[in-house]
Image: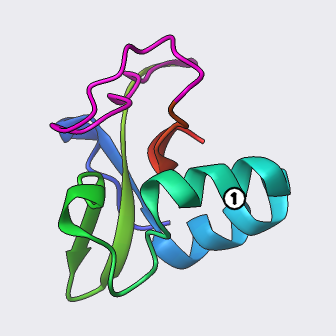
Amino acid sequence: MVENRTEWGLHLIPMETYREWFESEIPEDLRANVTAEWGEPWSEDLPQDKTVMIYENETGKYIVIPAVRFGDVWLMPQPARGTGRTMTPFTTAMLYPQHTST
């Protein structure tokens, strides 16, 4: 894990760490649906509108997880389940979650 910017209220997960977790821990049907909707964040040709929670600098590529921690309590906002073209209600089962909430 990289040095997290907890004072900013976010944590950075290295893309390879996330990819290993995603491919080994998430059921195959959910993985297929998430990547069909949002793409593979480790892909070099990921469309710009799918990169909202991805940060890249000279040390690598990261999934950004917004979170504020108070002792053992973590406050983590649920990411929007849509983009400008598909602002689907949060409670719908019609749109699969982003990589930042899988």
Q: Is residue 1 above or below residue 95?
A: below
Instruction: Identify the residue position indicated by label 1 in the image.
Output: 32
**Magenta span dominant secondary structure:** loop
- Residue at 46% of width from left, 78% of height from top? 42
Image coordinates of residue 51 in percent, x first then y, are 27, 61
Nearest to the observer: residue 101 or residue 92 = 92
Nearest to the observer: residue 48 or residue 76 = 48
Three-letter amino acid code of the residue under disc 1: Ala
Please give the range of residues in magenta.
72-94
Picture quadrant where residue 38 is located? bottom left
Report helix, strand or loop for mark 1: helix
Image coordinates of residue 88 in percent, x first then y, are 35, 22
Picture quadrant where residue 96 is located? top right
Nearest to the observer: residue 96 or residue 100 = 96
Q: Is residue 92 above or below residue 33?
A: above
Judge the density around disc 1: few (<14), some (14-19), many (≥20) Cα neighbours within 10 Å. Answer: few
Image coordinates of residue 58 in percent, x first then y, are 20, 88
Q: Is residue 75 left or right of residue 60?
A: right
